[in-house]
Structure formats: structure tokens, C-alpha cells
Image (spheres, grey):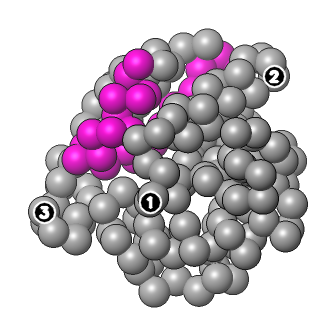
């Protein structure tokens, strides 16, 4: 597996992953019927942010976006988001993307990385994040309308760099 900069031709494989995640309504607060254009605008970022893909040969296995969590006085803290194709979840793609994001932030001198909205029922992702040094700073109760579980909490997670 290689992690590299997103190029526009990757969108044909990234969009189905993003659309599936949006429709599932289990981990991201995207409209379940979002268009490919809206998905592209939300996911593909320009500097100082970066969008990358994890690939095996010509196949996109997952994708990440990284950048400052906030502008101005908050720009010393990074953030990242990850999407992994359903059929390869649990095989280390998300871990590799998260490690990439942490390394990217360290290399650029960020003080830490903050995840603003990790759905508390996303146990696999939370386990990866904790293994890589993140802690739950707080939880907003009932902040996410899960497709099958109803309202569940959303964690704010942080990793000092």
C-alpha cells in the first residue's frame, strides 16, 4: 500500500467510498443523498490542507484530508478525516492513513491534532486513534443521529505532537 497525493482521476474511486459512508449514516454527518459535486467540495482540499489516497496498485483503498483545525489563532492544531472502503476495513488502511496524518502534522510543526466529531459508536476508529496517542477530551451527548441507534454522542479527541 502506498499513500500519495490525491489527483483528480482518483475521484472516480473516492466518491463511491464517500457516498457509501454518507448513506450509512453511522460515522459522518454528510447528507445521505449528497451529490458527487458536494462530496468533492467537502473532501478535496487545497493548501494549506492536503487530500491523499491510500492505494494498492491502481485501486484506492481509502483517503484522508489533513490541515489546520482552525484558521488564525487556532492554526497551530491540525485535524484530519479518513474514509476507508468497506471491503478493506480492519486491514490497517485507516491506521496507515492516521499515521500519515500525524507525521504530516509533525513535519509542519503543529502542536497537536484534534478530531472534532468522532461518533462514539465508531469503536474501530476510536481504538486506532487511542492506539496512536489520542485521548477523548469530551463527549457531546446525543450530537449524532445514527441510522440504527438513534442519537449517540460525539467525541472530541486530541493527540499532542
Mark 3 closeness class: few <14, some 14–19, many ≥20 residues within 10 Å: few
SS class, disc 2: loop
Q: Relative to residue 51, is residue 34 depicted above or below?
A: below
Of tags 1 and 2, which is closer to the observer?
A: 1
> Which residue does the numbered mark 2 point to in the structure image?
108
Q: Nearer the viewer, residue 156 or 34?
A: 34
Q: Inspect the magenta stretch and tell me whether residue 153 lies in it.
A: no
Mark 2 closeness class: few <14, some 14–19, many ≥20 residues within 10 Å: few
Q: Relative to residue 9, is residue 77 depicted above or below?
A: above
Work out which quarter of the rendered image holds the N terminus and state it.
top right
Q: Inspect the magenta stretch and tell me whether residue 114 lies in it.
A: yes
Q: Residue 129: horizontal and vertical position, in percent?
A: 43, 28
Q: CA distance from mark 3 to mark 2?
A: 39 Å
User: In the rendered structure, which disc, 3 or 2, sits on the residue that comes first in sequence?
Assistant: 2
- Name the residue located 68 percent from the left edge and 58 percent from the top edge: 60
> Which residue does the numbered mark 3 point to in the structure image?
149
Left or right side of 76 for 141: left
- Name the residue located 61 percent from the left edge and 53 percent from the top edge: 61
> Which residue does the numbered mark 1 point to in the structure image?
86
Can the viewer see residue 25?
Answer: yes
Query: Mark number for residue 43?
Result: none
Of tags 3 and 1, which is closer to the observer?
A: 1
Q: Nearer the viewer, residue 48 or 3?
A: 3
Q: CA distance from mark 3 to mark 1?
A: 20 Å
Pointer 1 and pointer 2: residues touching (CB < 8 Å)?
Answer: no
Q: Quadrant of residue 97?
A: top right
Q: Which residues are magenta?
A: 110-131
Of tags 3 and 2, which is closer to the observer?
A: 3
SS class, disc 3: loop
- Name the residue located 54 percent from the left edge and 14 percent from the top edge: 160
Q: Nearer the viewer, residue 96 or 78?
A: 96
Amino acid at each position: 500500500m502506498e499513500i500519495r497525493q490525491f489527483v483528480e482521476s482518483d475521484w472516480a474511486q473516492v466518491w463511491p467510498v464517500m457516498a457509501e459512508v454518507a448513506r450509512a449514516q453511522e460515522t459522518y454527518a454528510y447528507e445521505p443523498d449528497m451529490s458527487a459535486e458536494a462530496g468533492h467540495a467537502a473532501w478535496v482540499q487545497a493548501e494549506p490542507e492536503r487530500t491523499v489516497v491510500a492505494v494498492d496498485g491502481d485501486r484506492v483503498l481509502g483517503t484522508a484530508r489533513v490541515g489546520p483545525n482552525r484558521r488564525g489563532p487556532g492554526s497551530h492544531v491540525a485535524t484530519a478525516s479518513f474514509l476507508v472502503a468497506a471491503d478493506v476495513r480492519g486491514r490497517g488502511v485507516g491506521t496507515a492513513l492516521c499515521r500519515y496524518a500525524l507525521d504530516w502534522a509533525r513535519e509542519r510543526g503543529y502542536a497537536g491534532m484534534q478530531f472534532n466529531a468522532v461518533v462514539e459508536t465508531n469503536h474501530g476508529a476510536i481504538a486506532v486513534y487511542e492506539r496512536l496517542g489520542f485521548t477523548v477530551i469530551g463527549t457531546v451527548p446525543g450530537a449524532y443521529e445514527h441510522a440504527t441507534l438513534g442519537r449517540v454522542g460525539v467525541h472530541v479527541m486530541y493527540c499532542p505532537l
